[in-house]
Amino acid sequence: MSVQALFFAAYRDLLGTKGLAVDLPAGATVADLVAELRGRGAPFDALPAEPAVAVNRTYAHSSEALHAGDEVAFIPPVAGG
Amino acid sequence: MSVQALFFAAYRDLLGTKGLAVDLPAGATVADLVAELRGRGAPFDALPAEPAVAVNRTYAHSSEALHAGDEVAFIPPVAGG
Amino acid sequence: MIHAAVVHDPIAHEDVLSRVGAEQDGAVLLFLGVVRDHADGRPVSGMRYESYEEMATPVLREIAEEAAGRIGSDRVAVVHRVGELDIGEVSVAIAVSSPHRAEAYDASRYVIEEIKKRLPVWKKEHYVDGTQEWVAGTVPPVREPASATRENAR
Amino acid sequence: MIHAAVVHDPIAHEDVLSRVGAEQDGAVLLFLGVVRDHADGRPVSGMRYESYEEMATPVLREIAEEAAGRIGSDRVAVVHRVGELDIGEVSVAIAVSSPHRAEAYDASRYVIEEIKKRLPVWKKEHYVDGTQEWVAGTVPPVREPASATRENAR
């Protein structure tokens, strides 16, 4: 299955991209996606091992299962206000 | 000596006057002024025995000594804001 | 600049707000006290505020200065209105600004709480049924050893 | 009515303030977050705010609704700006009104604190020396049992 990873702010600057499609085995979780990306080496290995992530615009635990077409946003520490 | 007593809000309504001059013996305190007024009978005896009082526009303890010409305001419980 | 005033005309809250703010300030807070349409369940049609004006103005300034002192900002402005007020009219406006938000909230709250405790202002509620009543207030705190201090100051 | 928006244009705080207030409300509070001229002692010339807008808008609304729920008032309005801001420009405006002041302060503070904790917004400080840096932020809290709930909802 394919999910859409999104990168914001410092993560976007780090990776040089706003987002990319990632293929994952069925049943993969948020943690599996993070591992897949970090396994690609630099610059992806500079992502935190347990980043805050939102799945379809809701904060999600690393154990959450992903589904085809999910939008998975990597959320750097927030600084609104 | 003479001091000027002032009455506001509920106290003014109670006494029917905004203020009056009161003659007191030299060395009289706030408490003496209160006693003098309350001793006049109705409606003055309806004033509290220990009202909040400001002498010359500063809150003053009942033991504070008065001086000729002092402005002594009887301050009902306040309700600003 | 610290600003404190007791006024008779309607309060333009923008004017109060515009008295605070500075390039080093990241937080601005405006509090408005407004005449509401009920009190303890009774329908209210309006309110008359009275003050001991010669004393209320300096006490209001003292409160504003204390608030400013607490947070190390001199951007504190407070205006209290007296007279006849309708429902929805502003009785008090408090504006504060400071570098950080915690201080702004602290100072704003301090000003309104101290006003309630010790500003010589009273209000008479006009009820929809035609009656009116002085609002039960707060006995202002009086410091103990005023006498000696005052003697020395004369 | 609860109002929450992420905007690109300058915030007119009067518009935010005018969204709250009701005849039963005695307290109105307006908080403004403003870009200040320094950060941790470094002179700042401006700030760029970015958001994950598709998520920021619903999170901001959720925060406003939680604040309203805490105090039983639906008069909560919050607007957060994104884009390039100059010193002194408003980044966030929060207006709340309620019958009593304690609730207004509580709700106002809740909104800004929750924004800092979990609104997907980031800011890059532009320093007077020409450099720029993402401001160190807060890791948003994530609830534990999201997976099961989400499965059931599908």
Image: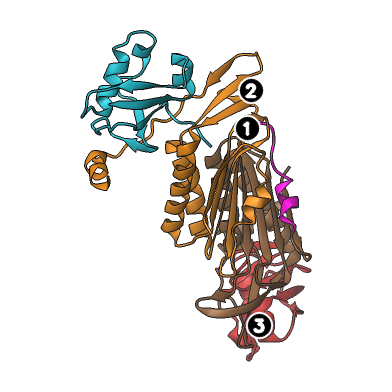
Chain colours: A cyan, B red, C brown, D orange
Percent from the top left, x then y, of residue D72? 44, 62
- Disc 2 marks a residue whose amino acid type is Val
Quadrant position of the C terminus of chain C in the picture: bottom right
**Residue named by callout 3:** B37
The one nearer the camera, C60 or A45, is A45
Taking the image as shown, residue A79 lies to the left or right of residue C60, namely left
Predominant secondary structure, magenta span: loop
The one nearer the camera, D57 or A50, is D57
| Residue shown at the point (61%, 74%) measured from the top left | B76
Crowdedness near tag 3: few (<14), some (14–19) or many (≥20) residues, C-alpha within 10 Å? some
Number of labels in the image equals 3
Q: Are marks 2 and 3 in contact (CB under 8 Å)?
A: no
Task: Name which quarter of the figure residue B29 lies in.
Answer: bottom right
**Residue named by callout 2:** D44
Marks 1 and 3: which is nearer the front?
1
Q: Which residues are magenta?
A: C12-24
Taking the image as shown, residue D121 lies to the left or right of residue C104, namely left
**Residue named by callout 1:** D35
The secondary structure type at the circle numbered 3 is helix
Residue B8 position (above or below residue A53)? below
The chain ID associated with circle 2 is D
